[in-house]
Image (spheres, rainbow, N blue to C red):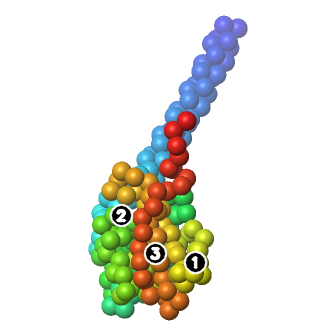
Amino acid sequence: MRSTTTSLHSSRTSCAGRLVRRIAASVALAATVATLTACSTLAPVQTGQKLIGQPESAVRATFGQPTDMFRLKDGTTRWIYSTQPLGEDAYAATFDRNGNLADFRNMLTTEELYKAQVNVWTKQDVLEHYGAPREPNQYFPIMKREVWTYRFFQDRMWYSMFNFYFDDAGVLRQTQITPDPLRDRPER
């Protein structure tokens, strides 16, 4: 009788041990997947720059479907991964003519936004550099200006909005930085 009890107890213990090992393996696997995903989510520029020279398929496998895709005049291709309308980043993956990643960077930085050329750029230039605006476009009839707005983290210090003002011909005539109304709240 005693050997049956011992055998039954031993069987339960080994079954419980296997269950614990399976759970531990599942947790470890989930942690590994989460860590790999977090790398491309929390440090996208660093992750993207490690892919330079890789084909489009490697970028798509890492970051997924881009929010915008453009064929540029010089024969290169640019994919935009935008976090708009509520995020402050738009990452550009630029591919050479052979379809290999040549550059990966955040386009919604103060330095990148100041590259916009008033009286030279058009709506298409803004689209190709920053992706489509995800905020509703506004039109000011007295000024005869359409305004596209992008959230960004100005100088990595202030939550701001970068506004592009276009005339009726679609030419960029003015830019403006304003505080982000979602983040710029008075202290209570």
Mark linked to residue 19: none
For the residues marked 1 and 2, what is the alpha-carbon distance in whole angstroms?
Answer: 26 Å
Position of 37 with respect to 6 (left or right) is: left
Pointer 2 residue? 109
For the residues marked 1 and 3, what is the alpha-carbon distance in whole angstroms?
Answer: 12 Å
- Badge 2, how many Cα within 10 Å: few under 14, some, many 20+? some
Point out the tag, 1 or 2, that comes first from the N-terminus. Answer: 2
Q: Are marks 1 and 3 in contact (CB under 8 Å)?
A: no
Mark linked to residue 140: 1
Tag 3: amino acid: Phe
* Camera-nearest label, 1 or 2: 1
Residue 115 percent location from the top left of the image: 31, 75
Eyeballing the image, is 142 above or below 19? below
Pointer 3 residue? 164
Tag 1: amino acid: Phe
Q: Kindly state the secondary structure of the residue where label 1 is placed.
A: strand
- Badge 1, how many Cα within 10 Å: few under 14, some, many 20+? few
- Badge 3, how many Cα within 10 Å: few under 14, some, many 20+? many
Write down the quadrant of residue 23 in the picture: top right
Tag 2: amino acid: Thr
Q: Nearer the viewer, residue 125 or 82?
A: 125
Q: Quadrant of the C terminus?
A: top right
